[in-house]
Image (spheres, rainbow, N blue to C red):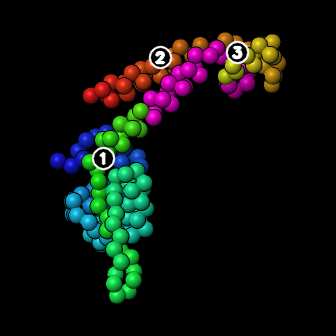
Amino acid sequence: MSALDNKAVRGYIQKLVGDEGMAVVEKMIEKVPDQEVTDEQVAQISGINLNLVRKTLYILYENHLAMYRRERDKDSGWLTYLWKLDLDNSVHMLRNEARKLIKKLERRLEFESNEFYICQEEAPHRILFDYAMETNFVCPVDETPLMHYDNTAEKQALRNRIDDLKKSLAQ
């Protein structure tokens, strides 16, 4: 069973490397699972452009989903990089991303707990209560009265998303 069989892991990796990069990952799993290979070999095996293969491998490496080892050719002195996927780490990385997202959503929920006002005439942009009070609840652009903005739906959507993420982490 491949780590890519997990829908969440597949989506996470696809978000990192895009569709073309995903093709590189799939070819590596299909053709050279658990083997060290050069980027040139991956390009040759997969038929995918070498620059795209390298870009994908570096993105995976930066996200701890691939590793490499360097070897120096004794005759020429050239360095050869041998790459290997390490997708076992993907579930751990996905959990870390979920934790970061929860923190970000909680900060947003805290911000949404403020009271907002909107201008009736201008393109709707929200104004915080403190600023609305400073302007005597009059739009600073067109001087029309500001209306209270009910963001209850946004706050509930944020709470639901946070709860869903926390439940998925608990599994």
Q: Is residue 167 above or below residue 63?
A: above
Between discs 3 and 1, the one toward the N terminus: 1
Residue range (magenta): 100-125
Task: Please name the residue shown 67% across and 22% down the image.
Answer: 126
Task: Please name the residue shown 62% across and 16% down the image.
Answer: 114
Alpha carbon distance from label 3 to label 1: 45 Å
Viewport quadrant of the C terminus: top left
Between discs 1 and 2, the one toward the N terminus: 1
Q: Are marks 1 and 2 in contact (CB under 8 Å)?
A: no
For the residue marked with disc 2, what is the amino acid?
Answer: Gln
Q: Is residue 104 left or right of residue 25?
A: right
Circle 3: is it few (<14), some (14-19), or many (20+) Cα within 10 Å? some
For the residue marked with disc 3, what is the amino acid?
Answer: Phe
Residue 36 falls in which quadrant of the image? bottom left
Task: Please name the residue shown 68% across and 25% down the image.
Answer: 125
Residue named by callout 3 = 129
Circle 1: is it few (<14), some (14-19), or many (20+) Cα within 10 Å? some
Nearer-the-camera pick, 139 or 53 = 53
Residue named by callout 1 = 89
- In the orientation shown, which residue stands out farthest toward the bottom? 75
Alpha carbon distance from label 1 to label 2: 33 Å
For the residue marked with disc 1, what is the amino acid?
Answer: Asn
Between discs 2 and 3, the one toward the N terminus: 3
Nearer-the-camera pick, 90 or 19 = 90
Q: Nearer the viewer, mark 3 or mark 1?
A: 1
Residue named by callout 2 = 156
Q: Secondary structure at mark 3?
A: helix
Alpha carbon distance from label 2 to label 3: 20 Å
Q: Is residue 128 above or below residue 63?
A: above
Task: Please name the residue shown 40% across and 65% down the image.
Answer: 54
